[in-house]
Image (cartoon, rainbow, N blue to C red):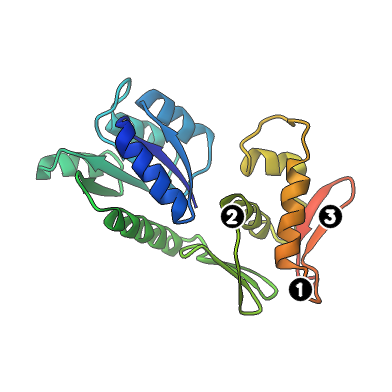
Amino acid sequence: MRVLLIEDDLETARFLCKALTETGHEVDHADDGETGLNYGLANDYQVLIVDRMLPRRDGLSIIETLRSEGVNTPVLILSALDKVDERVKGLRAGGDDYLTKPFAFSELQARIEVLMRRRTTDGEEADLKVGDLVLERLSQRVSRGGKTIQLVPREYRLLEFLMKHKGQVVTRTMLLENVWDYHFDPGTNVIDVHMSRLRAKIDKEFENTLLQTIRGAGYMISDGA
């Protein structure tokens, strides 16, 4: 899962970035409101964690602007302001949940899981399947034929994007923009390297090959049916 953390307290940010990464998330961090807003508008995240009080732009202003621009990504607000009317302001600004500081990471993680579960009930598939390959988005578990496959965060994002477009040719440009956030070709073999590693994990031990290279076009994942 890709998470945007907008938090100006560097100690809190370091702790959350480390904890979220260790639990399998890929985290982008912005330490001021203006930068955080730009990240939120330019990239695709599954969850936003937004501090209420930020330099350059207030957290509620960020949320209101994102919502006005059509960004519906679930938002968890962090704040030391714990009065009821402050929580109400946060939710009315477009936040989906409100967690007061100090907090336990286990509670933050549980609230993220609830937000993602709520999002899947609103129309986004909880599980992606191609043949006997299954990607469970809530738990971030990937398995094939019942066997668990261990992926690093970038491999997970790559597989998720491919599976969301199963049966379709996915170009290198699409992968660069949606998995690596490059809006230009950096001229490296980064896609080839990750695709090779991913293919070894999901196809090598199985008779039916799912991941295909479409020469001159890109890649496609399909069960061949």
Is 165 in front, or is 30?
Answer: 30
Residue 107 appears anywhere in the view: yes
Residue in the image at 29% along x and 27% along y: 54
> In terms of image quadrants, where is residue 88?
top left
Q: Which mark is residue 205?
A: 1
The local crowd at label 2, few if under 14, some if 14 to 19, many if 20 or more residues have their Cα within 10 Å, is few
- Horizontal relation, residue 207 to residue 83: left or right: right
The amino acid marked with disc number 2 is Val
The amino acid marked with disc number 1 is Glu
Location of mark 3 (residue): 213
The local crowd at label 3, few if under 14, some if 14 to 19, many if 20 or more residues have their Cα within 10 Å, is few
User: In the image as oriented, which residue stretches furthest toward the top?
Assistant: 56
Location of mark 2 (residue): 152
Which is more N-terminal, label 2 or label 1? 2
Residue 195 screen position, x and y as percent? 74, 52
- Horizontal relation, residue 49 to residue 25: left or right: left
Residue 206 screen position, x and y as percent? 77, 75
Q: What whole-number distance in Å separates the C-alpha atoms at marks 1 and 2?
A: 19 Å
- Horizontal relation, residue 24 to residue 202: left or right: left
Q: What whole-number distance in Å separates the C-alpha atoms at marks 3 and 1?
A: 18 Å
